[in-house]
Image: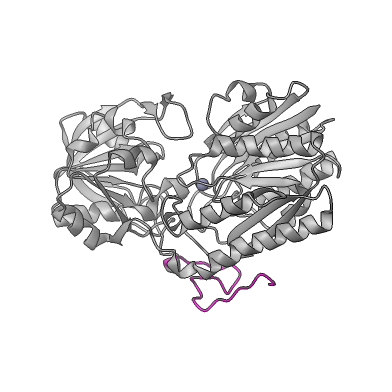
């Protein structure tokens, strides 16, 4: 039995002022994709589950994943899509790991485009199952082209591998277990930042308990709740509940059950919409700095949430740094700022030298302007980097040069490529011990598990940028209206 597998994912922020290009994807092709499954990601889970079946021949295609960022360049999207379609020859089933929030130039719903063409390629009788991120934006029409799906149930995402396994197991149940799936789909008009939907905190924790409860209802194969990626100015967006049931005995009854349970999840969510606030301690810039300076705990982690690369931020908005300097804060690590020109200037000056230069504010010019600073070059790195984070095993990878510039007691990490600081190791290899500072600024939303484990206290700072948690401050033009919370009086019911 030949099963096509692949992975293709990107979280595309339509406010980010640059495209995500072919080179931005970490891509593998053909059998190479199967050698790289030591990762705990959803693709690894798919391959692991399929390998439990002796009669399965795994047909590899492409794995391509990029850091969240701007909309994907069309040639990059088409290249990877064709890679998946070309491998779809004489297969009995398909299982893909997708993010679900990819947009390309001229395409608002890439996963729909991909799955429509894949269905046309394999025909109506070959089952297709999909593993998705919890921040997926799906449209109802896509459900016609797939047989089953399941999304992560945790944020931060700690269950990616298990989600992949589940997607593959559902495929095998369809192929060998006589399962005939039916899909129920419900979407509520709600732009919800991920920072308000951490699954360890209420109300998302309670919502996920409901999802697990639904998954235990007899006849239900999977239940998923996707809070979506809200920084996408496309018409059809919102929070989605999808329930897949087994219609082996009665497809009509299974369809009704799937829809009823999806509606139950969506209705519960909608009823609680007013309870979704930033779950962590959170303030505007001035208040956050005051709280951090007055804190008994040390260090206090400040999340520069409006410029979060984990959701597509440029990482070059300097407003929080400017405010810290203005307040005279010292013993601060600031990670980091993407400014290749500034790194080059530090390299040219050399360690120990004082320089005056303008940093940041050059890419996301809508939310920041270059900040003029004078500092001493503390250290320089050639770019050999220890990578951390949940989704990659630890290892060394080349990142481009990095400079640490001390500006009036603030160690500013300047990077020549865009960086997501997900693990304390990424600071320690630069000689910066996060626990030695009074304040550690990270361009992030909520902290990753690795940082949360060492943080005595963390404060989310509401800052401007492409990932502003106050979505009402963003310039949405294309989303369907009414849309909560842009329209606080928006209404919704399952019949809509
Ligand atoms: Zn996600």
Residue at the spot x=54%, y=44% of the render? 20
Q: At which x and y percent is residue 140?
A: 70, 59
Whether residue 381 is visible, yes or no, is yes
Residue 455, image quadrant = top left
Of residue 11 and residue 159, the one placed in the foreground of this image is 159
Which span of residues is magenta-colored? 473-496
- Residue 262 shown left or right of residue 356 in the figure: right
Image quarter hosting the C terminus? bottom right
Residue at the spot x=78%, y=22% of the render? 55
Q: Is residue 62 above or below residue 493?
A: above
Residue 91, image quadrant = top right
Q: Is residue 384 above or below residue 200?
A: above
Residue at the extreme front: 218
Q: Is residue 387 above or below residue 77?
A: above
Residue at the spot x=61%, y=73% of the render? 492
- Residue 427 shown left or right of residue 93 in the figure: left
Q: At which x and y percent is residue 491?
A: 58, 76
């Amino acid at each position: 039995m030949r099963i096509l597998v692949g992975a293709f994912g990107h979280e595309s922020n339509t406010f980010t002022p640059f495209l995500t290009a072919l080179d931005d994807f970490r891509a593998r092709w053909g059998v190479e994709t199967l050698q790289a499954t030591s990762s705990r990601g959803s693709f690894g889970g798919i391959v692991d589950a399929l390998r439990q079946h002796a009669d399965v021949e795994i047909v590899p295609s492409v794995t391509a994943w990029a850091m969240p960022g701007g909309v994907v360049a069309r040639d990059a999207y088409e290249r990877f899509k064709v890679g998946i379609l070309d491998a779809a020859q004489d297969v009995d089933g398909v299982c893909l790991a997708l993010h679900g929030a990819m947009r390309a130039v001229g395409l608002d719903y890439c996963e729909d485009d991909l799955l429509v063409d894949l269905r046309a390629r394999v025909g109506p009788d070959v089952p297709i199952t999909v593993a998705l991120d919890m921040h997926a934006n799906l449209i109802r029409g896509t459900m016609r082209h797939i047989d089953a799906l399941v999304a992560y149930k945790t944020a931060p995402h700690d269950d990616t591998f298990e989600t992949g396994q589940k997607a593959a197991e559902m495929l095998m149940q369809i192929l060998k277990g006589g399962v005939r799936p039916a899909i129920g789909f419900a979407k509520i008009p709600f732009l919800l930042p991920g920072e308000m939907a951490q699954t360890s905190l209420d109300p998302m924790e309670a919502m996920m308990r409901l999802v697990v409860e639904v998954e235990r209802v007899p006849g239900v194969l999977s239940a998923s709740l996707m809070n979506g990626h809200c920084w996408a100015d496309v018409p059809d967006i919102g929070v989605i509940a999808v329930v897949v049931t087994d219609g082996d005995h009665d497809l009509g009854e299974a369809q009704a059950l799937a829809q009823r349970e999806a509606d139950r999840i969506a209705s519960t969510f909608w009823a609680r919409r007013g309870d979704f606030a930033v779950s962590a301690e959170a303030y505007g810039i001035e208040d956050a700095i005051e709280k951090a300076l007055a804190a008994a705990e040390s260090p206090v982690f400040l999340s520069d949430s409006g410029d979060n690369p984990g959701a597509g931020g440029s990482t070059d908005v300097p407003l929080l740094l400017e405010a810290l300097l203005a307040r005279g804060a010292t013993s601060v690590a600031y990670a980091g700022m993407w400014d290749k020109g500034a790194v080059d200037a530090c390299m040219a000056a050399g360690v120990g030298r004082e320089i005056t230069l303008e940093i940041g504010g050059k890419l996301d010019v809508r939310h920041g302007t270059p900040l003029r600073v004078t500092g001493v070059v503390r250290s320089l790195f050639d770019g050999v980097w220890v990578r951390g984070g949940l989704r990659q095993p630890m290892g060394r990878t080349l990142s481009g040069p990095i400079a640490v510039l001390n500006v009036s007691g603030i160690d500013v990490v300047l990077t020549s490529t865009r960086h997501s600081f997900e693990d304390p190791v990424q600071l320690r290899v630069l000689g910066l011990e996060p626990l030695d500072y009074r304040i550690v600024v990270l361009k992030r939303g909520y902290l990753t598990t690795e940082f949360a484990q060492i943080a005595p206290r963390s404060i989310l700072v509401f800052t401007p940028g492409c990932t502003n948690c106050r979505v009402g401050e963003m310039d949405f033009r294309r989303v369907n209206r009414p849309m909560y919370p842009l329209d606080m009086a928006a209404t919704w019911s399952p019949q809509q």
